[in-house]
């Protein structure tokens, strides 16, 4: 996808929003959400930047909201999402686009309420039939490059993650994809059957709260909002509009859901990503099967073996072998489960993989300690 472009190319993102609202009104009755009034007028410190925020609810929709931002000759933003009521386990419709005169960065997806690399029945229920459409757009809007497993846990097999040059053609394709994906979401909403089981409803609510908690903490647009409208107003916009529900659907904190981000002082590590596999190419095949698992495991195995070597160095011959063996990699299962959701420890195959790595680490550390004990060489590792 190539060709010269400027910020004026493509449709204004308000056209995307208008389409979505019109299509929704054909299927259900929208009423203004309570957050609509508070954020009806958003004043930027820059007079050249225009905000437009809308939010609604409907019988099956807890929140349908959109935010568009445009600064003339600089950038345009679309942030559109739809969340179902907890009585339904519908995916979360998500469209995020950031456009400059040079390029556009896009995430368009039906974000799964439940991790599709673990919950196959959920993946089949919502994504199996629409994989051909996803395959079509994955060819027109190619994978945008490296993305970590931390972000991937909230994406579905049909996600469009792409970066393209800002041309009329490319924005036309994006508009078509947005319309197709949103119509699919509306069809799923129409077909959704209300859940009556209180346990299931509570689980759906917690999963949506977990999603909101992650997005509110890791929102990449927050620095821009802070610059445009100030820290206090930006925080309100994130917590009470974009990810409304983070303060009402549950009481768990970010670190309750994602303890791997805890710092020694109990605060949240603000890094955008932690240790994890980065996927440079699309990690799902045309049928929606996750194919990044083996590659991620190979990298994880290599990293953990390196960690075992480092631990072995530290332990050296100062400790007896049984004591050393107890201490060398007690961190490993936690690391695996939290950073590689596609390799959940609830799966027998994953447990077998963990056992394989543990066995290899056993061999490496025992061999290394024995060699050192015999030779007195504390620098040379027996890594075979």
Image (spheres, grey):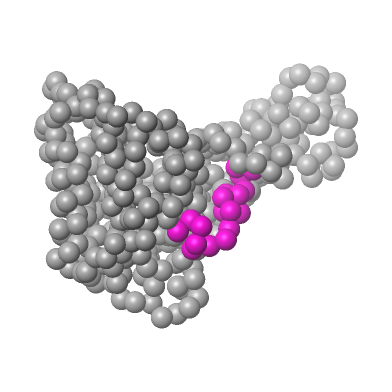
Q: Residue at x 69, y 43 (%)?
A: 266
Closer to the camera in the image, 354 or 67? 67
Q: Does the magenta stretch include residue 121?
A: no
Q: Is residue 295 visible?
A: no
Q: How many marks?
A: 0
* Residue 24, image x, y percentages: 19, 62
Residue 68: percent from left, percent from top:
27, 42
Pick the residue in front: 297 or 27: 27
Q: Residue at x 84, y 43 (%)?
A: 322
Task: Decide: is 277 above or below 384.
Answer: below
| Quadrant of res 112 | bottom left
Range drawn in magenta: 245-262
Kindly tell me whether residue 345 is visible in this rendering: yes
Is 358 in front, or is 170? 170
| Residue 312, quarter of picture | top right
Q: Tell me the quadrant of the picture where the N terminus can be found.
A: top left
Q: Residue at coordinates 28% horizontally, 52% vertically from top-left?
A: 54
The reply, left or right, for residue 173 in relation to residue 144 is left
Place of residue 350 in the rendered image (x, y in percent of width and height, measured from the top left): 54, 53
Q: Position of residue 308 (x, y in %)?
A: 69, 34
Q: In this view, does 304 lie above or below 124?
A: above
Query: In the image, is 207 to the left or to the right of 78?
Result: right
**Residue appearing at x 81%, y 19% in the figure:** 377
Q: Is the magenta stretch mostly helix, strand or loop?
A: loop
Which of the two residues, 297 or 269, is positioned nearer the viewer here? 269
Q: Splitting the image into 4 quarters, where does residue 50 fall?
A: top left
């Amino acid at each position: 996808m190539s060709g010269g472009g400027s910020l004026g190319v493509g449709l204004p993102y308000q056209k995307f929003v208008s389409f979505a609202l019109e299509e929704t009104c054909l299927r259900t009755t929208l009423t203004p959400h309570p957050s609509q009034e508070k954020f009806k007028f958003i004043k930027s410190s820059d007079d050249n930047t225009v905000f437009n925020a809308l939010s609604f609810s409907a019988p099956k929709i807890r929140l349908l909201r959109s935010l568009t931002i445009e600064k003339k000759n600089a950038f345009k933003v679309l942030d559109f999402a739809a969340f179902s009521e907890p009585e339904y386990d519908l995916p979360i419709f998500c469209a995020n686009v950031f456009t400059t005169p040079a390029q556009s960065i896009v995430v368009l997806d039906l974000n799964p309420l439940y991790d599709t690399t673990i919950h196959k029945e959920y993946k089949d229920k919502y994504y199996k039939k629409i994989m051909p459409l996803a395959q079509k757009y994955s060819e027109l809007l190619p994978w945008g490059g490296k993305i970590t497993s931390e972000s991937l846990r909230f994406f579905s097999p049909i996600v469009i993650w792409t970066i393209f040059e800002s041309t009329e053609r490319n924005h036309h394709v994006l508009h078509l994809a947005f319309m197709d994906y949103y119509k699919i979401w509306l069809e799923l909403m129409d077909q959704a059957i209300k859940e009556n089981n209180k346990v299931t409803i509570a689980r759906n609510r917690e999963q949506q709260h977990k999603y909101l908690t992650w997005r509110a903490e890791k929102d990449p647009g927050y620095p821009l909002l802070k610059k445009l409208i100030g820290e206090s107003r930006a925080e309100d916009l994130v917590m009470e509009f974009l990810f409304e529900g983070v303060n009402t659907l549950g009481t768990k904190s970010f670190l309750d859901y994602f303890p791997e981000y805890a710092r020694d002082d109990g605060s949240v590590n603000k890094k955008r990503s932690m240790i994890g596999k980065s996927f440079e190419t699309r990690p799902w095949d045309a049928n929606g099967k996750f194919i990044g698992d083996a590659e991620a495991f190979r990298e994880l195995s290599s990293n953990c073996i390196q960690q075992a070597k480092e631990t072995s160095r530290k332990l050296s011959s100062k400790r007896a072998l049984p004591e050393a063996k107890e201490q060398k990699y007690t961190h490993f299962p936690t690391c695996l489960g939290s950073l590689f959701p596609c390799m959940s420890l609830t799966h027998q195959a994953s447990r077998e993989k963990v056992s394989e790595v543990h066995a290899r680490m056993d061999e490496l550390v025992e061999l290394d300690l024995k060699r050192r004990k015999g030779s007195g060489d504390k620098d040379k590792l027996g890594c075979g």
